[in-house]
Amino acid sequence: MADQFPQPGDDRGAAAGAARIVDGAGLDAVIRGLRGRGYRTVGPAVRDRAISLAEISGVADLPRGWHDSQSPGSYRLTRGTDREIFGWAVGADSVKRQLLPPREVVWRAGASDRLPREEGPAESVPLALVGVRPCEVAALRILDRVLGGGQVADPRYAARRQDLFVCTVECGSPASTCFCTSMGTGPGAESGFDLAITEILEDEEPRYLVRVGSDRGAMVLNEVESRPATPQDEAARQEVLDRAESQMGLRLVTDGLPELLERNLEHPRWDQVASRCLSCGNCTQVCPTCFCVSVEDTTDLGGTVERRRRWASCFEVGHSYIHGGPVRPTTRSRYRQWATHKLGTWHAQFGTSGCVGCGRCIAWCPVGIDLREEVSAIRAGDGLRAAGPRSGGG
Amino acid sequence: MNSMSTGFHPTIAVFKFASCDGCQLSLLDCEDELLALAGAVRIANFQEMSRATIEGPYDIAFVEGSITTSADLERLERIRATSTALITIGACATAGGIQALRNFADVQEYTAAVYPRPEFIRTLATSTPIAEHVRVDFELRGCPINRHQLLEVITAALAGRRPAVPHHSVCAECKQRGTTCVLVAGGTPCLGPVTQAGCGAICPAVGRGCYGCYGPAEAANPRALGDRLLAGGMAPADVTRWFRTFNSAAPAFSKESLRHDPQRQR
């Protein structure tokens, strides 16, 4: 396939809009090109029996031949002998960790400091995310709205986001837990990227259709051997996306969803799900858009004071603690808060749904609670009310 | 204000009841901070460190171990009366410890099996946590406790602030450190979803399920996890065993262990 590529000096311009084709070596060159430009390149890699985001230095670090099988409460990785690099759906790890780290110091003051010293992000090197799925790009867009703009912009998030390079890979391998088509976030990528890649598997050796989304993306692609995409290549890409759509799991029907949830706050389904819910908070930790953090002040024996923040969860009792007690004292009230915020009130607050349909909360729930099933049960019993008296928060 | 600016050097005493001493040894395990700690507090009674003791009253009493004899109960009441703050450390003190397995059995059968002259053994029928007998100001969980959390409790006491000791599940610690869920990705039985964080999620990080050393997390739902373990092929008697280790007498774990206990189902 290499002899199909034009030689240096031929038509190498990759203007935005005109898709190009590269091979595996070209993909490697994209990653190396980003590193050459000073980016820390982070992409999918097999870590601890799952696809996670890790620092990569080339195609050799990507999970070639690895495939996953996911269902509610279950995730398994297997390795094949095929040449496919992106033949899996997202694992527990998401872009959230890269931009909103699980723990960080907000400020620090020593015993002799008159004022606390603000702690910026530890990383000064710009980040390039390579091989993240369109649902991850959608999650970035949501996090941008929540953390990156407006009066309450988080300077640490903004600093990491500022120079972020996004090279997404469209999804050809959704899991049964995936429902991005329901949320309008995939399997294809339409915006929010510098480069968008589609892995085409027609031949033994995959080829990669690359679309450019920014000038930065064009500059990186221009330095890589490529050829223009043909109508056949474009058709092959469409086939990948069509197949992904057909493999999608259960749908989540979003018609009038915020209103549906709002008028069903006393639905008996909330009691049923609460009896199964572990209240462990895994769904919120793996969710790429759950942005809640808790802030803790600590002191040490040497007189240093630190304000730290860590990922928090609305499943923690203390999350709703206000003057003497938690507003949401039961698992029922906490699950309901999570689901109605994610799918309902998020719209009023941020103008979009908080869900990107990645299915992590379904696969990584140890007891396999399926958000899609919970919503459809409420839809099926629209207007039902649980028997018995209720306290406000319970 | 911290101790250096106020000159407040609280007297600290460490007391032991039925326990293995591992939790109080966590204090000596604070090697890097030990000198600073010795400068910040007056250690008045700590038998594992020194035979020299100072009479009470004490500002802070750290109490390790569970109550298993009537003499211990009297000693505990005296300690409470001479201490401004009483902080329990470890699963024995906060939940009765592994010796609370006797609560599910006949302790006389145990003493007969273990001791050649069981008639010399004077022990209560149950092992109970300290808070069941006296007022406790703070409970630090774990088997053993985590020394970083112990330091956090001490520095919080020195500064007059609330200790940052979360009550959420171990799962949060796994996710924060990026450990893949052993239950979801491997089918390995794990008590993490119902166990309080604090250890740093050590066991899942090496591919093992959580043993529940820190006792029930807040709002834990052990019944849902018990059902999940059964669905994964675990025998009911083994579900009972899983919930009966270091925190077997903690009510949330005790209840789930009894649900599957073949002895109770006869």
Image (tube, rainbow, N blue to C red):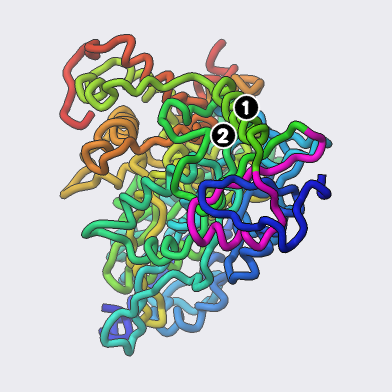
The residue tagged with tag 2: helix, strand or loop?
A: loop
Instruction: Establish if A124 lies above or below A311.
Output: below
State the residue in front, A346 or A365. Answer: A346
Under mark 1, the amino acid is Glu
In front of the other: A379 or A82: A82
Instruction: Give me the residue at 63% from left, 48% from top.
Output: A44
Residue in the picture at 24% in, 46% down: A321
| Residue A230 on image: x %, y % | 66, 38
Q: Residue at x 54, y 65 (%)?
A: B26
Picture disc at residue B244: 2
As rendered, which of A283 and A5 lies closer to the eye? A5
Query: Where's residue A31, x and y in %?
Result: 66, 59
Q: Quadrant of the C terminus of chain B?
A: top right
Residue A227 in view (yes/no): yes
Q: Which residue is mark 1?
A: A239
Subunit bearing disc 2 = B
Is residue A142 or residue B40 the one in the foreground? A142
Q: Residue furthest front?
A: A10
**Part of the protein shown in magenta:** A203-228
Give the residue type that dot 2 points to. Arg
Residue A1 is covered by the magenta coloring: no
